[in-house]
């Protein structure tokens, strides 16, 4: 049976670092599914820094939208994959696939693959609901959708970790 670990927390709380640390405990082949797109110089720098942190011990897949297909397309011998991160992925989906509804077709297939993942997954996402209420409708919509997505992933996960100032706090599992 494959296991899912869900890591959430605030921005710069150590989520990605902890996810990589957990993945490095595996002896088998590891993968990293990156959802960020290099749309400006600052994001390019962030992506480059993350690549250096991973080195070549991870198979890299970059996928901004098709998260389910990225997971399904992993080589059969991958033991664990880090998905980093759902927050950026959801932003990509909302930006590219504008919808007036609070549902996006890409979300359900991703949630479905969590029922039978091909390998252990470590899924990273920001906890965006612990701050002020955003002052505009798009930001509130994003916060609400991300909150719902995080709840659905946490429900399916075997283990949920909340990162607080670089310290992992086990919430579930």
Image (tube, grey):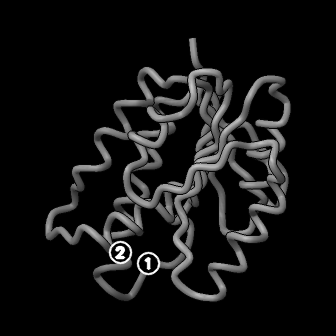
On the rendered structure, is 98 left or right of 123? left
The secondary structure type at the circle numbered 1 is loop
Between 14 and 54, the one lying in front of the other is: 54
Disc 2 designates what residue? 140
- Spatial CA span between label 2 and label 1: 7 Å
User: Mark 2, residues whose alpha carbon is within 10 Å: few (<14), some, or many (≥20)?
Assistant: some
Q: Nearer the viewer, residue 85 or 118?
A: 118
Measured from the top left, where is residue 74 in percent x and y?
54, 33
Question: Looking at the rendering, which quadrant does residue 104 occupy?
Answer: bottom left
Please identify the quarter of the rendering in which residue 140 is found. Answer: bottom left
**For residue 99, above or below residue 137:** above
Instruction: Residue 131: name its quadrant.
Output: bottom right
Q: Which residue is mark 1?
A: 133
For the N terminus, which image quadrant?
Answer: top right
Residue at point 83% right, 36% down?
A: 24
User: Vertically, is 62 above or below 151?
Assistant: below
Instruction: Give whichever of discs 2 and 1 has the lower sequence position.
Output: 1
- 135 is higher (above) or lower (below) than 77: below
Asked if disc 2 and disc 1 are in contact, CB closer than 8 Å, the reply is: yes
Circle 2 — which element?
A: helix
- Badge 1 crowding class, 10 Å Cα cut-off, few under 14, some 14 to 19, many 20 or more, is few
Q: Position of residue 152 (x, y in %)?
A: 41, 40
Q: Quadrant of the C terminus?
A: top right
């Amino acid at each position: 049976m494959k296991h899912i670990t869900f890591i959430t927390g605030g921005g710069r709380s150590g989520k990605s670092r902890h996810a990589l640390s957990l993945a490095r405990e595996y002896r088998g082949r590891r993968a990293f599914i990156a959802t960020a797109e290099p749309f400006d110089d600052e994001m390019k720098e962030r992506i480059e820094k993350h690549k250096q942190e991973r080195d070549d011990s991870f198979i890299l897949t970059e996928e901004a939208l098709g998260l389910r297909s990225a997971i399904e397309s992993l080589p059969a011998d991958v033991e664990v994959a880090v998905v980093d991160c759902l927050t950026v992925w959801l932003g990509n989906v909302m930006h590219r696939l504008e919808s007036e509804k609070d549902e996006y077709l890409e979300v359900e297939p991703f949630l479905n693959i969590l029922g039978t993942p091909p390998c252990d997954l470590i899924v990273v996402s920001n906890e965006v609901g612990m701050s002020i209420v955003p002052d505009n409708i798009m930001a509130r919509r994003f916060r609400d959708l991300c909150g719902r997505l995080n709840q659905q992933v946490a429900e399916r996960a075997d283990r949920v970790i909340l990162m607080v100032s670089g310290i992992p706090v086990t919430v579930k599992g």
